[in-house]
Structure formats: C-alpha cells, structure tokens
Image (cartoon, rainbow, N blue to C red):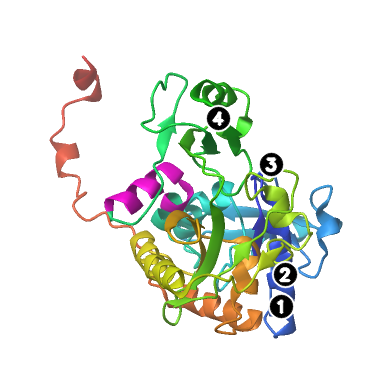
Amino acid sequence: MIFGGPSPEHDVSILTGLQASRCLVESGREVHGLYWTKAGSWFEVDPGLEGKDFTDGPPKGASPVRFVLGPDGGFQSAGRGLRTRQLQVDVALVCCHGGPGEDGSLQAALDLAGVAHSGPSVAGAALGMDKLAFGAVMAESGLPVLPRRLLEATTSDVGFGPPFIVKPRFGGSSIGIEVVADLAAARSVLGASVHLAQGAVIEPYRQELFDLQLAARTYPELRLSAIERPLRTGTDPEILGYEDKYAGGEGMAGAARELPARVDPALEEEIRRAAVEVSRLCGVTGTARLDFLSDGTNVWVNEVNTIPGSLARYLWIDPQISFASQLDDLLEEALSLTPRKFVSLGADGTILQGAASIAAKLA
C-alpha cells in the first residue's frame, strides 16, 4: 500500500491509504504499508495506524526502505547488520493523490522496477494531470469543454472574456485555483502562487455552473457509478474548494454531497455517454473519477482524477459495490495487466562500430 508522497495532497493520500489498508487487512490480505514522505524518502509502517500518527512525518516504529530500480528492483528494507531484505510485493496499490504519485512519475518508477501496480498507466496518469493537454484531447475528440488556454506572463488575449478562473496546469485538486476579474489580475497571480510555478491555464468563470461527478472502474469491465453533486460549504462560494472536499477528515468520503444527484434524465444520459468516451480516450485503468460542469441543461467535461480521494468508494451505491470488492478488483486488474516491457531491438551496436570518434563529432 503506497501512500503519502511529495504533493500538496500528501495528507489526503495518507487517509486514502489507511482506509484501503484497514479494509484489506480485515479481508485477510497481507498488507505492507509503504509511506512516502513529503521529502521523498520511504518507510515501511504499520498499516493499522491512524492519520494522526503521521502528523509529524514518519510515525513511531517506521522502518527505512529503499526503492530500487532495475531487473532486481523493488522495495528493500534494512535488516540486522545493515543487510537489506527484499519486500515480497505481489502488487502495489497506489493511493497517492497529486504530484509525482499521480502524474506518471511513480508509475514509471514502478514499471522500471518491475512492480505491478494499480491505477493509471504512465501515459494515462500524465494526460490526466495535464489540464491543458487533457482539455485539448477532449475538444479535438468532439466532447463539450469550456475553452482552456495556457496562461503566461506575456498573455494578452485568450479569446474569451472575463471573469476568469486560473488553475495550476499540473495540479491534482482544487489547490491553487483563483477566480479573477480580468486578465491583468490573472497574470498577477502567476508569480504569487507556488502552485502555478510549473504552469497555469485560464478558463472562463461561469458562476451558474455546478459540479457533477461519477466514478469509472475498468475491471472486469467498464462500469460507471451513480452521479453525485458535491456541495460547496467552504469559505469560498465561487468554487468547489479543497476545504469542501477534505475538511471532514475522511478524504472525499466525508465531503458534503447530493448522492445520487437530482438531474434531468437526458442530462444524466449525456454525462454517462461522455464518461465512457473520456475513459476510452484516457485509457483509464483502475478506478477514476470523472468531473463535469453543468448548468442543469448542458454539460462540459472538466477533468479526470486518475487516483481519486478515498478511491471514490463512496460513489458505488448504484450499482452497489462494497469497498472490499472494489479493492479486490483493483488488485486483480493490476495482476492481470501485461507487465510493461522495454524493447531494445535494433540497438545492435552497428552504428557505434562505424561511428567516428566523439572528439571528431564535436569538432
């Protein structure tokens, strides 16, 4: 069970990982808790701990672990006499939200180490995390999306009028989102927010729109959950903020919501049709949460969360699927997927033998 990580959503990732760990232990699974710290180091921890045990970092009794890449890679724990022992891991259940745990970085490392893992592929994770690329793929495929542009310090025109909403290009949640009155204000927040340092996107802000969400799971076949309408109860009435999602202390499972959402049947049909297409285009595997915006009549694709808070367990009321069954399917799917193989066919040394000296090439 991998949770935590150097991400603004570190704390929520811990809650998701501990929820899943508790459920798996109760169902008889042998679980290794692998805690990824904010600084990027790794520890093996008791999977039965509580969230408060991680308030100050690695909890009492945590054992340092090394994450090693290569053919004999994986997770290694220091034993007596500084010897290392390989942790026998059949599959890693990834519960990291945002940052390198959800953007493809961790997925790539697990592939290089030969560790089977749940959740998105490298490509699927990267696309889901990049709001600019995701929006472009949806638009090019004919799905309804609000216009979304790259925002830079030199941006003078975006092709639509204010007010605007500014989002981190690579953010995984509501952290760093700002509603601004004009383009000058939009540019000014670029240098003021650390969450926008890696890039930002700008969209039209429409106050009348509200959020609608559902989950998609892909094993043993693609299935969609009930639709929810998350409720805005935080200090900012303009957007569904981080406080709305997570302030309850249970991850997304404790957030205020209308479930199932009361929506027109035609709108529900459109959301479900779009959700199937989004899942196909993004190559969704595991459990993802698909987020839409609506005015009650029309719907726009907003984003995909490839590792959603609480693994979206609370959405499976119709069809009704227990959390234990959801986790079992995540693990079975991860084990059933063909391990990623890296091919070097064609690199037979021919061009190296016929190459001139490096010094000559630099001359």
Question: For the residue labelled by badge 4, is the local secondary structure a helix, a strand or a loop?
Answer: loop
Q: Any mark on residue 39, and which?
A: 3
User: Where's residue 312, x and y in %?
Assistant: 60, 68
Which of labels 1 and 3 is toward the front? 1
Secondary structure at badge 3 equals loop
Residue picked out by circle 4: 197
| Residue 113 shown left or right of residue 80 in the figure | left
First in sequence, mark 3 or 2: give its number.
2
Q: Residues within 10 Å of mark 1 (few under 14, many from 20)?
A: some
Image quarter for residue 350? top left
> Residue at image x 68%, y 54%?
232
Q: Earlier in the sequence, mark 3 or mark 4?
A: 3
State how far apart marks 1 and 3 are (Cα).
28 Å
Disc ID at residue 122:
none
Q: CA distance from mark 4 to mark 1?
A: 38 Å
Q: Is residue 15 toward the left or the right of residue 210 in the image?
A: right
- The residue under label 2 is 19
